[in-house]
């Protein structure tokens, strides 16, 4: 059974998409620049957490959240 999605449902995912996109971009740059073989799973996990802590700000999340009412 598939639930109906609201007409503007993609707008409601804006916050998550922005966070994911920013983390993905930074992680890809790090991964392509990785020069000592392949990173371990733990190294990748640590890097994602580091990126999350330094790239994602509460202000950017707030801006996205507060813009939702204008988009829906």
Image (cartoon, rainbow, N blue to C red):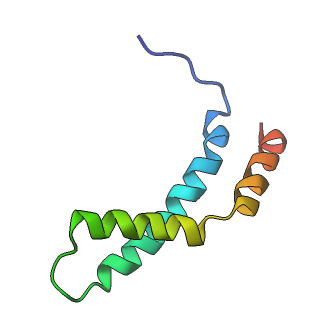
Q: Position of residue 68 (x, y in %)?
A: 77, 43
- In the rendered image of this protein, does residue 3 appear above or below residue 69? above
On-image quarter of the N terminus: top left
Q: Position of residue 58 (x, y in %)?
A: 71, 59
Out of 45 and 13, give the one closest to the viewer: 45
- In the rendered image of this protein, does residue 53 appear above or below residue 11? below
**Going by the image, does 43 lie left or right of 70?**
left
Q: Quadrant of residue 60?
A: bottom right
Instruction: Name the residue at 37% across, 73% down.
Output: 28
Instruction: Name the residue at 76% across, 62% down.
Output: 59
Instruction: Name the residue at 58% across, 70% down.
Output: 55
On-image quarter of the C terminus: top right
Outermost residue toward the left? 37
Q: Position of residue 5 (x, y in %)?
A: 58, 23
**Going by the image, does 1 lie left or right of 42?**
right
Q: Position of residue 43 (x, y in %)?
A: 29, 70
Outermost residue toward the bottom? 35
Instruction: Name the residue at 17% across, 76% down.
Output: 38
Out of 30 and 5, give the one closest to the viewer: 30
- In the rendered image of this protein, does residue 7 appear above or below residue 42? above
Out of 25 and 58, give the one closest to the viewer: 58
Image label count: 0
**Going by the image, does 24 lie left or right of 15?**
left
Outermost residue toward the top? 1
């Amino acid at each position: 059974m598939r639930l109906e999605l609201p007409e503007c449902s993609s707008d409601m995912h804006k916050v998550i998409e922005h966070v994911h996109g920013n983390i993905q971009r930074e992680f890809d740059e790090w991964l392509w620049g990785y020069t000592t073989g392949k990173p371990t799973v733990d190294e990748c996990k640590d890097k994602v957490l580091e990126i999350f802590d330094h790239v994602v700000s509460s202000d950017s999340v707030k801006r996205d959240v507060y813009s939702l009412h204008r988009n829906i």
